[in-house]
Image (spheres, rainbow, N blue to C red):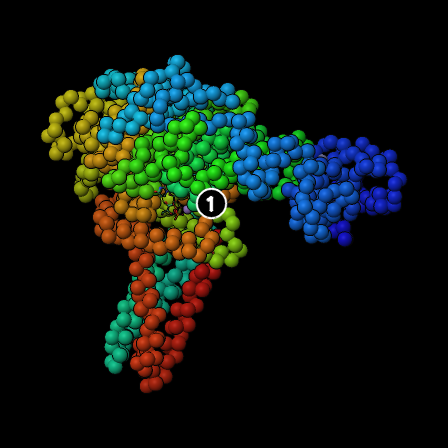
Amino acid sequence: MEAKGGMVAGSYKRNELVRIRHDSDGGPKPLKNLNGQICQICGDTVGLTANGDVFVACNECAFPVCRPCYEYERKDGNQSCPQCKCRYKRHKGTPRVEGDDDEDEVDDLENEFNYTQGTSAARRQWQGEDPDLSSSSRRESQHPIPLLTNGQPVSGEIPCATPDNQSVRTTSGPLGPSDKHVHSLPYVDPRQPVPVRIVDPSKDLNTYGLGNVDWKERVEGWKLKQDKNMTQMPNKYHEGKGDVEGTGSNGEELQMADDARQPLSRVVPISSSHLTPYRVVIILRLIILGFFLQYRTTHPVKDAYPLWLISVICEIWFALSWLLDQFPKWFPINRETYLDRLALRYDREGEPSQLAPVDVFVSTVDPLKEPPLITANTVLSILAVDYPVDKVSCYVSDDGSAMLTFEALSETAEFAKKWVPFCKKHNIEPRAPEFYFAQKIDYLKDKIQPSFVKERRAMKREYEEFKVRINALVAKAQKTPEEGWTMQDGTSWPGNNPRDHPGMIQVFLGHSGGLDTDGNELPRLVYVSREKRPGFQHHKKAGAMNALIRVSAVLTNGAYLLNVDCDHYFNNSKALKEAMCFMMDPAYGRKTCYVQFPQRFDGIDMHDRYANRNIVFFDINLKGLDGIQGPVYVGTGCCFNRQALYGYDPVLTEEDLEPNIIVKSCCGSRKKGKGGNKKYIDKKRAMTRTESTIPIFNMEDVEEGVEGYDDERSLLMSQKGLEKRFGQSPVFIAATFMEQGGLPPSTNPATLLKEAIHVISCGYEDKTEWGKEIGWIYGSVTEDILTGFKMHARGWISIYCMPPRPAFKGSAPINLSDRLNQVLRWALGSIEILLSRHCPIWYGYNGKLKLLERLAYINTIVYPLTSIPLIAYCTLPAFCLLTNKFIIPEVSDTPLFNVEYSILCAALVCCPLIHVGMELLFS
Ligand SMILES: O=c1ccn([C@@H]2O[C@H](COP(=O)(O)OP(=O)(O)O[C@H]3O[C@H](CO)[C@@H](O)[C@H](O)[C@H]3O)[C@@H](O)[C@H]2O)c(=O)[nH]1
Ligand SMILES: [Mn+2]
Ligand SMILES: [Zn+2]
Ligand SMILES: [Zn+2]
């Protein structure tokens, strides 16, 4: 083989290397001068071969690499020399590697590689041989999966191999010896007396709780806390907006670097050299279309009138749907974020971080369709995210109530203790191990440290063992035992019937729930499986998300929340900070309901045969919408303002209020016209933060009759009004007042947990506004479109954020039936919205939804209907042939027509082509 690498580094000059090769080929002559050479990958000495020669990994350039590194590279790495990139040849004494083209022999590299005994077993299993052979015995040495049982009381703590405080208590039976981290719970749902146990490793989580305090005291406490919060963070929300000169009222603010006052993002206009031709083509096409339609409508075909009529109707429909598709793309924009300014403003070195708390939601249903390993990767990427650990919580919703998901999550929590510190120490990307290790590293680029190489390898082994454990769980779960699943203590798994089971919550990790291997805290990880009972609608993902909104409000109450599908991992660990560049921006924050990131996919074949990538949609349509009122919500990779999900209105005028205070006004009793609007704003202006709490203190005077009143405040701030809106949970309602997130001040921790179970009970949403006005909106399988639409109709804007490194990546359906199914589901979801009261054609004419935004929504709702004229139009030629009639007039009489029509047709055909070409130019 020819040495083709031109790059020869440092002292390893080509001629020298050739000499080495020569020598080493030449025979047993030891190369004294090269003894003690340092491996350029791991920093160990390269070492000698059995006959005393220096080990030479690469026969082409002799780049110094020790045997373990060489073998590792051959097995798991690039399989080629880091320097000259030549493929490594099988070395003397090296066993053959699978996939080596020379010979096919059994791979017993693990004997060569210094894998431990356990790892060897692990590797064997991982490669698919006897999946549960040693896993059960190995489990003993690993951590035991905590129990979440539903039967007999557990007398004490479950013996843990790890010194965590994870433990389980019954809720119904006698309690074991008390432990400060363990809280017992009476069961909550009175309708379904099913006890649910909760593990709560985090005592801090429980310092708050509201249940026993009466309403008035609660509100009093909340007010105090709010005031305290406001004084504690003087520079957080009192700044001027964005680029406007800050009006510093205290010394600290004056000292602030100018940079900290700069806006956290900016709009990058798309150059007019790009945009103008694009628009010109649209206009041209529009004109041609006009002529064409005019000709078609004014020249009926007498002898084939029905055919002509059908074809003209189809053509008009196509023209309209094209128009609908074009205009929302008229003002595309790009955005740029400034993470450094964000850090300067909210996350300064040596000070407690002032970044807002964020709750991240992951939704799963069926672990057999959505592999637990993928979900685990998603969770790991969240736990390792680059954000203050005490401000991130991860909630996993399990709609399938599968013990497999639960156990896999437990393993994941354990593995996170090693994985998270590794990610943070070496600042790696992406932080989902499967995808990280799939990347090959280039040892000569980025000055990779030998210590890193070793730790990476050790971590990879750990990950492989983790994979084995997960795969063993999956293998075990393939066949459900007749009597259902049983937990480790012999009690049966409460979720054995996914359609009829109690709510389950388990907290992993978090404050005192086990530190990582470096002794640092980890983000909280919470398993949630909402209650399911026959006869109750569960509303699929939307219902699951709404349950999570409530649980998270009770347990951590992040000011923002981000949701991902279980197969969408954080590909960019700074994604949360990217979102905060908008959410915490004084100018944008108050009116932004969500920040949507594009959906990107792994593992799509080069030709993208099922059009999974949706390039036109994600790189053109959404950018276009961003220039109007904001992108639609696409269901995953989206960071929400919690207050927007509560159905509140944004603060629409900028000078009126202190920044970031969202005025609570009823979305039900909407304003009337322009005249009312002025009054409306005045009212808002009058409602400063402190004033807005006043109605609460007056709530005793609030009578039933007030509801008919046109006084939004009294209605909304009344306890009754709030309960009608949010459901019967005082803890949750109190949390909705915490506009900057965090838990309200309170007392009883047991109540808090009880409340968490209460808010995921299936009857909770009865007679409330959940799914109607607040949270994820029900009524369509594409709940995402509906949810985003409701917010835009209230006047919120959304932001499209495309960091250079894609924030999230997912897996897309890559077989035809799954993909067709998905597309069909989306189409049906659109039709459901079209026929619902939330149809964008009729809904929400209050002046807050911009016209072009509405057109875009109408387009996403009516597009499936295009299939009807499309089928008709495609069958027309067949009809024409059969009946020997034609849908356009005979043209023989005027040759001019002939020419004209041909040109028109050509133009109509060419325009879309030019168009698509230009759209691709954008991306
Ligand atoms: O009862 C259910 C059904 C689904 N899901 C979750 O919802 C997500 C999306 O479901 P999936 O079947 O994967 O639908 P897709 O078509 O792949 O998802 C796209 O389309 C959906 C509907 O528009 C959006 O909700 C998703 O975010 C978007 O990725 C997944 O995480 C599921 O686990 C639930 O939590 N509960
Ligand atoms: Mn999916
Ligand atoms: Zn080495
Ligand atoms: Zn080489």
Q: Which quadrant holds residue 675?
A: top left
The residue furthest top is 177
**Residue 554 image point, x, y percent:** 33, 26
Vertical placement of residue 147 versus 543, above or below: above
Comparing 345 with 58, the one in front is: 58
Cβ of mark 1 under 8 Å from ligand 1: the answer is yes
Image quadrant where residue 459 sits: top right
In this view, which residue lies farthest toward the bottom?
893
User: Taking 666 as reference, is 209 left or right?
Assistant: right
Residue 271 seen: yes
Tell me the SS state at disc 1. strand
- 339 above or below 330? above
Vertical placement of residue 290 versus 85, above or below: below
User: Is residue 294 visible in this depiction of the protein?
Assistant: no
The residue that appears at 41% across and 69% down in the rendered structure is 909
Callout 1 crowding tier (Cα within 10 Å): few <14, some 14–19, many ≥20: many
Q: How many marks?
A: 1
Residue 272 picture location, percent across and down: 45, 53
Q: Nearer the viewer, residue 633 or 264?
A: 633
Horizontal side of 635 relative to 680 (left or right) equals right
- Residue at the extreme left of the image, as rendered: 705
Q: Amino acid at mark 1?
A: Gly
Q: Residue at label 1?
A: 810
| Residue 511 in picture, x, y percent from top left | 45, 22
Judge from the rendering whether residue 24 lies leftward or rightward of residue 506; answer left or right. right
- For image coordinates 69% across by 37% down, the residue present is 111
Residue ranking furthest to the front: 482
Q: Residue at x 74, y 46 (%)?
A: 90
Residue 843 % position (x, y): 23, 48
Point out the quarter of the image occupied by ligand 1. top left
Please tell me which residue lies in front, 75 or 861.
75
Give the residue drawn at x 33%, y 17%: 174
